[in-house]
Image (tube, rainbow, N blue to C red):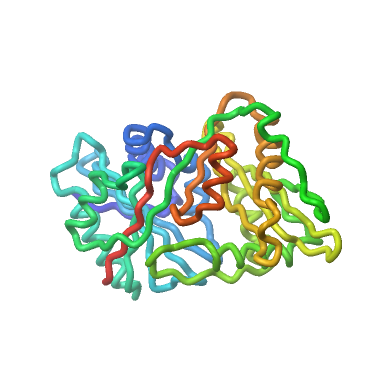
């Protein structure tokens, strides 16, 4: 058996790497999540200001036994590397995950990282427990945070999404490119989201978004083949961008859609703006569906206002994602 380094530059190698992770997710999750093949390869192969992605595979002859996907943060959380380990079911309980973890730890230490962060997608929606959490705990990881995984099966009736806009606000919508007239304010909202989102006890530093980073993120998603729907609320009296929500996906996996951020500026909370942007954005994205799809979202259990909005829209819980850290 040998460890193989994967950087996305070789499409054939990356496909074998990717198929292990995809097969595990399809097997273990009622509603599989994650990027499509080319979307993931472009992320790994590209040069980005905020993150570098690569991976490791444990290979026996021509057989891929398991993989580790690594995200190396470059602007914030520069002492942390995130890892996801996936092992083919036929090769479990043979030390594959342990060997991959040891290789990841060696690489992280060599890069000067002090924290290894991992997550498990398959936890029970109530207890959070799974085989993955047992593996993490047995190897010294400490549970730091949990997020409830909810799904909404689309389409939903339009009358369920008939939400009125609060007085004093109007909506603006855009697709993949953030309009230049809003980009500076939008960067501020993204920074606010990074600061306010519940993160439990994780070792995390909020990223400070700039217009340049927003433009780079827009171009990256276009290169990946992703589509995004954004609805934002403007306070008409001040011209201030008060709230936004984003949803999107990729044509490669049309049945999987992701609810990304929903955020309301602190000075505009208490006016039902979260629902006011989320419902019309959902109506827009499902109007373009060629077939039924599942919209995925994750929220910390303590984020009661957002979970209440999701419940009202018809989301239901299916799993709990737990996040773990190992000091290096």
Closer to the camera in the image, 279 or 272: 272
Q: Name which residue lies at 65% across and 66% down.
A: 266
Q: Name which residue lies at 66% across and 45% down.
A: 278
| Residue 248 pos. (x, y %) | 60, 43
Rendered-image quadrant of the C terminus? bottom left
* Direction right: furthest residue: 237
| Residue 232 pos. (x, y %) | 73, 52
Q: Name which residue lies at 38% across and 38% down.
A: 22
Q: Name which residue lies at 73% across and 67% down.
A: 184
Q: How many marks?
A: 0
Closer to the camera in the image, 253 or 63: 253
| Residue 282 pos. (x, y %) | 65, 38
Q: Tell me where residue 186 sits by quadrant.
A: bottom right
* Direction bottom: furthest residue: 112
Closer to the camera in the image, 266 or 228: 266
Closer to the camera in the image, 251 or 62: 251
């Amino acid at each position: 058996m040998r460890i193989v380094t994967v950087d996305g530059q070789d499409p054939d190698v990356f496909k074998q790497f990717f198929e292990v992770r995809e097969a595990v997710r399809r097997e273990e999750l009622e509603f599989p999540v994650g990027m499509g093949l080319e979307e993931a390869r472009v992320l790994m192969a590209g040069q980005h200001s905020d993150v570098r992605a690569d991976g490791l595979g444990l290979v026996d002859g021509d057989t891929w036994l398991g993989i580790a996907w690594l995200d190396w943060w470059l602007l914030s959380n520069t002492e942390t590397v995130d890892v996801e380990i996936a092992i083919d079911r036929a090769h479990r309980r043979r030390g594959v995950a342990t060997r991959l973890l040891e290789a990841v730890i060696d690489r992280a230490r060599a890069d000067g990282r002090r924290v290894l962060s991992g997550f498990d997608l398959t936890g029970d929606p109530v207890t959070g427990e799974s085989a993955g959490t047992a593996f993490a705990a047995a190897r010294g990881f400490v549970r730091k945070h949990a997020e409830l995984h909810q799904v909404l099966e689309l389409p939903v009736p339009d009358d369920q999404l008939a939400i009125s806009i609060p007085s004093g606000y109007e909506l603006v919508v855009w697709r993949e490119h953030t309009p230049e007239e809003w980009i500076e304010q939008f960067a501020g909202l993204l920074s606010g989201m990074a600061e306010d989102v519940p993160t439990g006890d994780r070792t995390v530093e909020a990223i400070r978004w700039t217009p340049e980073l927003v433009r780079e993120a827009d171009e990256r998603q276009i290169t990946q083949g992703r589509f995004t729907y954004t609805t934002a609320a403007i306070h008409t009296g001040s011209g201030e961008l008060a709230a936004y929500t984003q949803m999107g996906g990729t044509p490669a996996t049309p049945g999987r859609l992701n609810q990304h951020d929903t955020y309301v500026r602190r000075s505009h909370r208490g006016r039902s703006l979260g629902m006011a942007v989320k419902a019309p954005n959902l109506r827009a994205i499902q109007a373009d569906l060629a077939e039924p799809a599942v919209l995925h979202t994750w929220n910390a259990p303590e984020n009661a206002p957002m979970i209440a909005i999701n419940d009202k829209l018809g989301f239901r819980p299916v799993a709990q994602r737990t996040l773990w850290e190992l000091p290096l």
